[in-house]
Amino acid sequence: MPGHYDELRGMARPAADAPARSNAARPPLTPDWAEFFELLGREGFADLDRRTALMRRQLRDNGVTYNVYADAANPQRPWSLDLFPLIVTPDSWRQIEAGVLQRVRVLDSVMADVYGPQRLLAQGLLPPALVQGHPGYLRAMHGVEPLAGTHLHITAYDLAHGADGNWWVVSQRTQAPSGLGYLLENRLAISRLFPQAFDALHVQRLAATYSAMVEGIQRMSPAGADAHIALLTPGPYNETYFEQAYLARYLGLTLVEGSDLTVRDQRLYLKTLKGLEPVHGLIKRLDDQYLDPLELRPDSRLGVPGLLQAIRAGNVLVANAPGSAFLESPALLGFLPALARHLLGEELQLPAVPTWWCGERAAMEAALPDLARCVIKPTYGDSGGPAPFDAVLGNALSRRQLDEWAGRIMRQGDEHTVQTYMPLSQMPTWSSGTGYPPRIAPRSVMLRVFAVSDGPRSWRVLPGGLARMVSAHHSIASMQRGGSSADVWVRTEGEVDRTTLLHRHQSPAAVVRRRRLVTSRAAENLFWLGRYAERSENTLRLARVTLSALNGEDQSLAPLLAWLHDMCKAFALVLPAVPSPAQARRVFERSLIAGLGDTEQVQSVGYNLRATRFAASAVRERLSQEHWNVIVQAEEDLLARCADATRSGDFSALEALRLLETTSTATAAMTGAQTDRMTRDDGWRLLSIGRHVERLGFLSSALARAVSSGALATTGGFEAVLSLFDSTITFHSQYQQGRELPALLDLLVLDRDNPRSLGWVAHTLAGRLAKLAGDAKVQDTPLARDVLQPARWSLEEICAVDADGRHADLLKRLEACVQSAYEISDAIGAIYFTHSRDAKTSVGA
């Protein structure tokens, strides 16, 4: 085999058995790379390590991640990006652009025929086994004419730069191509690191193509330019969820999951807090088989029941039209030249790597003798099949293994496709921090380019792409297998397009139309984000108060210990079987400390911080990067330090208190981000309501248990309650050294200026509920009256004692507060999350 093409020098590298060149005879750099290196600046290569560190920090700070399914221990990892871009010359890009535009026309025509008259099948230009035998062929879509007659709106092509200097198609993606979001992040990072080179090399910009894609989908949808377009994601556990959220934010689309949508009267709607909003266009990042559980996979929870019927009725445009999976089969590459001649009357300008589908006997017999120099691929790819397998490189197999594969191919020829192995071109990368001196090292690279529709049966090629580099331990470009990426700079000889999406919506009317919708799913996750964030703070403070009391001067006070034991059990900081501190103080303390980092058995600090992160991950597109980073870092730091302390056997009460103090600082930052950095829309109101519901229930319960246990009658218990309410400084500044119960109740129950008092919480909660409902009279509803009770009590009422000297009336009122918190939570779920009509009537009447 000839050697790899060298991007740095613009020529094929010598084959492995060719004589080595001396350094003096080494060919010069291409003009593009020579100019790039000349524009590095005064410090040149000496500054590249610093730029690499800046790039990695930016990716980390921006939270750019990739979910690795194979790594159960750490499924999220930072996105891997190389410092140098892949530079594509104008001549190369002309070949790529013309060839890709031609190929997307062929593929769209093939799909139109397969789901229409099927002449290609009748004339033998396409084998039925590759179409109707493909698991991704959707019989439910036969005869369905897509809106504007366009089936494919976004397609991707993986290209290899051959030793002959030409670009070759290796594979194509049509169902839900990934990369459009990651390549934007790559461009943002690398262009900032090399601004002088980026401008001097006349690199074509990307925004105009993205803008044309969105506007084209809007025009082709039923509502035209006023169409509401959404991006359908499988959810936060999908491998490329980050880029889906990023892309939706960049393009101004609504990011939705299947549960956010519903079909009514053959029309697609988005479930929002304000009711159902029509959706006219859907860019899907979901494989076709999961789109509609009524007509496709019945076990799918990712799709929308009735979606295919809405498509058939012409009420929604889906990009791409469902049913394109068979186009991704590598076997189809071998049939496209003849299809291009038949459909377009043209020869393909961008060749594909020679490919043989072994379902045809002649092709199988031609491929088997050269199996050692080929790649064996599954014909049906990720869509399944009787015996799915990963692609296999023939040159990595032994003679015995080659014979075994040959036998398998002969028995099941239609399931195997053989493709000539093409050595990938190698681009320069900056290698440092790997035990070797910093240097330029070659890495094999594959280029993914995208064609997007900008109108009916009209496409344009994004002037850039996603360069994917092969991992040092694998021979196939795959991010799942440890590969990395690079930005792609397409040089232009003409004018650089300066279009920016920042100026797409400038009219006042457009701004009004773009008011952010809050889906019911996002609302529910925001509500629970607020609850878990508040619960994290509460459990943190309770653990600190408990550990401080167990190691302070009041550790022998029976009422105080009884209250702390009751609280820790009630709020799941220790298991129910753990003895009270009065019985075995050290056992109780060790159990409490051991549970701080437990995420499964007890609902202590670690559990609540993890739940906070899970809720936040479902609405990550609504959170600032700083907010998200604080949430992730708080959980990671606490769990890591708990694990280290447990392993070392040095997890003392003092160490635990230090850790809790550090974590408290992180949760305070989390609270600040939610209070001061989020837009006051209905989503934020639900987050705030979640926080105040949790605070109302926790503080009411804590005070009731303190009154019942008699802890308030002791100095230690009195101070512990103030500390739990985070009101110690406020109390002592107002009442000096007093320890009177009326003063305590006035501050913790009635004071409207204390954000930790029940009265303040109840009043704020009622206001949020009123604003959410859009009705100022909501405070007259039975639910709101219950919520507002603490704000209406008098000091005389709550200080009253009965004939036995007990505060029975206060306890009854506090228990009613706890109950009202539960009722609010249930009612909010019924009204805004499940849209239960009966619940809405009973609460709002």
Image (cartoon, rainbow, N blue to C red):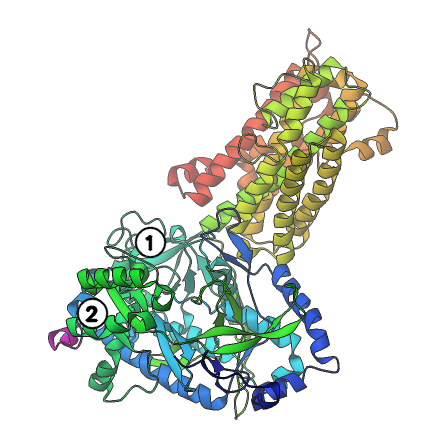
Mark 1 or 2: in front is: 2
Q: Are marks 1 and 2 in contact (CB under 8 Å)?
A: no
Compared with 237, 89 (above or below) is below
Q: Position of residue 559 (x, y in %)?
A: 72, 15
For badge 1, the amino acid type reads Val
Secondary structure beneath disc 2? loop
- Going 46% across and 68% down the picture, which residue do you hit? 179
Q: Quadrant of residue 306?
A: bottom left
Q: Crowdedness of circle 2 by 10 Å Cα count: few (<14), some, many (20+)? A: some
Q: Which residues are magenta?
A: 119-125
Q: Residues within 10 Å of mark 1 (few under 14, many from 20)?
A: many
Rendered-image quadrant of the N terminus: bottom left
Q: Quadrant of residue 77?
A: bottom right
User: In the rendered image, which residue does mark 2 sit on?
Assistant: 115
Front position in the image: 350 or 45: 45
Query: Horizontal placement of 106 versus 756: left or right?
Result: left
Q: Which labelled disc corresponds to residue 304?
A: 1
In the image, is residue 510 above or below residue 165?
above
- What residue do we see at 64% from left, 24% from top? 567
